[in-house]
Image (tube, rainbow, N blue to C red):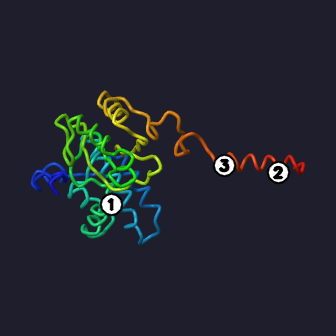
Amino acid sequence: MADAPQIPDEAEVRARWGAFAWTPENAEKAKAVIARYPAGRQRSAVMPLLDLAQRQVGAETNTQGWLPVPVIEYVAAQLDMPFIRAYEVATFYTMYNLAPVGRYHVQVCGTTPCLLRGSDDVMAACKNRGMTKGKTTPDGLFTLTEVECLGVCTNAPMVQINDDNFEDLDYDSMTRILDELAAGKQPKPGTQNPGRHTSDPEGGPTTLVEMVKANHDYRKEWGA
């Protein structure tokens, strides 16, 4: 795909990441993760270990992180599993990045609920910040990806940026979030609608209010 992030040359990747090893702190974390599984089932730890490895790469590169092939090989070897099995996991789940990304990986949901609620405006805010789908901005800050449903349809449109969801977006709120990130600030995750709490109905509860009132009336009538 033309908008897919480009994996660097293999020789370059192996020169940079061929000697990958856990930091002392992450080695302890990996040991603790593996210990959660019964003897002979250590391969079940592949997902959390791949995530841990991606985060270590991110810490070393000041990005969200990605999984170079030598890093996947390292995890597979620790779990005594064929590389291709670990690679299958890394390529199946979109939580793993198979190519370098920026400090902030901006994943814009373009599925129908978000599209109907204005995801085009969210995408426009990203593009007006100099982003192009599948690419990282020259300053290394942002990588833009259009993704499928992220599971927050009631608060559409939304984006996921690294580990945080930002919901109930429009052009202005998305622009503000990107500006704050670029300035080194941490914008408030979750709904960006000031009159809304999490995924409550806009305007406040309706059915629950009636249920509470009915229960109150019943108790009053019967002296409960």
Q: Are marks 1 and 3 in contact (CB under 8 Å)?
A: no
- Residue at image location 35% in from the left, 43% down from the top: 161
Q: Residue at left 72%, top 47%? A: 212
At horizontal 19% and vertical 43% (from top left) the residue drawn is 132
Distance (Cα) linking label 3 and label 2: 15 Å
Name the N-terminal-most of marks 3 and 2. Answer: 3
Residue 194, position in %: x, y?
50, 33
Residue for badge 2: 218
Residue 93 numbered mark, or none: 1
Q: Position of residue 158 (x, y in %)?
A: 39, 45
List the residue tagged with mark 3: 208
- Mark 3: which secondary structure? helix
Q: Residues within 10 Å of mark 2 (few under 14, many from 20)?
A: few
Q: Secondary structure at mark 2?
A: helix
Residue 9 lies, in percent from the top left, at 10, 53
Question: Does residue 103 appear left or right of residue 166 in this picture?
Answer: left
Q: Amino acid at mark 2?
A: Tyr
> Which residue ends up furthest to the bottom in the rendered image?
40
Left or right of 46? Residue 206 is right
Q: How many marks?
A: 3
State the residue lying farthest toward the top: 183
Foreground mark, 2 or 1, reads: 2
Mark 1: amino acid:
Tyr
Three-letter amino acid code at disc 3? Leu
Q: Nearer the viewer, mark 1 or mark 3?
A: 3
Q: In front: 22, or 222?
A: 222
Spatial separation of the CA atoms under disc 2 and disc 1: 51 Å
Quarter of the rendering occupied by the N terminus: bottom left
* Label 3 packing within 10 angstroms: few (<14), some (14-19), many (20+): few
Residue that appears at 40% across and 66% down: 44
